[in-house]
Amino acid sequence: MIKYLVLLFNMLAFLVYQVIFTEGVTINQTVPATAKPGSEFTVELRINKGSIGGFAKLQQDLPEGFTATAIENSGGSFSFNNQSVKIIWASLPSQPELKVTYKVSVAGNASGKKTIAGKFSYVDAANQKQSVGVDEASIDISASEPEAKKEETQPSSGGGTTTTATDIKKEEESKAPQVQTITAARTMPTEVEGEFTVEITLGKGSISGYCKLQETLPEGFTAKAIDRDNSEFTFVNQVVKFVWVSVSAKQEQLKVSYKVTLDKKVSGAQTIEGLFSYIENDETKKYLLQSGNINIKAPAATSEPVATKEPENKTSGDSAKTTTTTTAATTTGSSGSSTETSSSSSSGTTTATTTGSSGSSTETSSSSTSTETKPVTNVPSANTNVNYRVQISATHQNVEVSYFTGKYGISEQIYAEMHEGWNKFTVGGFNEYKNARDHRENIRGKGVDGPFVTAYNSGRRITVQEALMITSQKWYR
């Protein structure tokens, strides 16, 4: 009696264990009762998994003469190898029920009763591996072939049947693994100056499960995803990666795109290499994409103004510049020729020479003042005769002062002037050179490249050296 009570207790404990630790997982399998040799049928499984998640695997062993291809995997990775169907989930989907279907092809020489069984394995909440069996399903493969195929089998002299070459060929074809045809098309410009878009369309056929597309970009290229097509995107060490944990066999095409930003130093012919990887029959297969060639044109004159530095006088000023303008006029008459040449500079000389029938004369004059073009825009007159400013940029292009406000965060008034054919931009207005020098460092701290102090006398631009001499101030580095 005690023996039976112990046995009953063990059975109850086992049932409780099944209820608790299998978390109510149930599996219903649908398989047709009969099939003919050379035909196809569908196996359907509905897995009521409840709330379990994480890693899981469904495995079914098929009889000899059966081959399987995926139809629907509910996000799992399908494979068929050595008569075993495997569907693996790296992480189970959230829905409580999974539907799995796959197609079975029956060999032409198959016959008799066949069984299909399997099990569903998963990791429970306690991180323990659990398994639930799939009830065996029987299917009867009729010994007689379909009517259309009877003519291929002829009676032998012994009264039996003879297998024809056609039967052998069909049997070999049914056992041979399917060869996937991969196609790939990369769309991108052939020549660019700045950003551009790369679009890739992959024809993957019935491939399912894990897939990966990677693109190797040249140095100076930076990539950002546009369309991921439900993949995980990364860009590390010049390699673009699109990774699909599990794609459906029904989705015959994958389409992704990404934007490339170029470093300013990149130019000339560049090449993008691509590789598509996938798993087939538990083996990793690779498909090499055709290289993408693109020519990066050297940028034309940049739209960003380029600051220019006037040469510094290391001993007596922050900036000293000499400009020279030469004009020549020649007149020829009956009595000879007359040539007049004038030259002017901020601290240069002017020479005029006239030659005629009666001889020649030369006049030379020297001036210490500048004949530079006066400002034509909004440089105001200084409160005193001489003041100092900080130049932040000079460019031949037309640029609004709002550009510098936005780029460098300069909140003070920015003055623009045309000087020596350049658009020059300055800030500040200081009577003391030292204060202008200090403000120059503040402007440099905002990211301005190479700001320097310049000077004005009654609104006319002069050299800092002249300004220091006029104001009897000391120069500071």
Image (cartoon, helix red, strand yellow):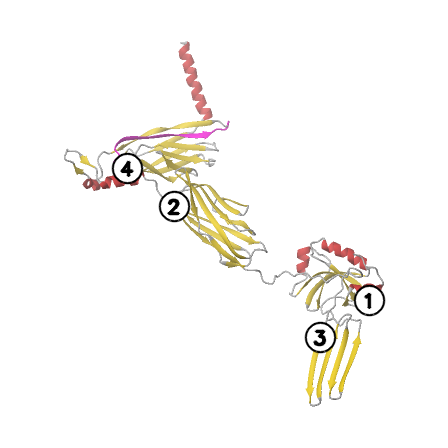
Say if 190 sits above or below 355 in the image. above
Say if 264 sits above or below 278 in the image. below
User: Which sits earlier in the primary sequence, circle 2 or circle 3?
Assistant: 2
Identity, as a three-letter code, of the amino acid under mark 4: Ala
Mark 1 residue crowding within 10 angstroms, few (<14) / some (14–19) / many (20+): some
Where, quadrant-wise, is the N terminus in this rendering? top left
445 in magenta: no
Q: Which residue occupies the extreme right position in the image?
A: 472
From the top left corner, tell me how far across and down residue 79 is, in percent.
39, 37
Front label number (3 vs 4): 3
Front label number (1 vs 3): 3
Magenta range: 107-126
User: Which sits earlier in the primary sequence, circle 2 or circle 4?
Assistant: 4
Residue at which label 3 appears? 326
Q: CA distance from mark 1 to mark 3?
A: 30 Å
Residue at which label 1 appears? 385
Identity, as a three-letter code, of the amino acid under mark 1: Asn
Identity, as a three-letter code, of the amino acid under mark 2: Gly
Q: CA distance from mark 2 to mark 1?
A: 82 Å
Viewer-closest of 235 and 249 = 235
Q: Which SS class for mark 4?
A: loop
Residue at which label 2 appears? 205
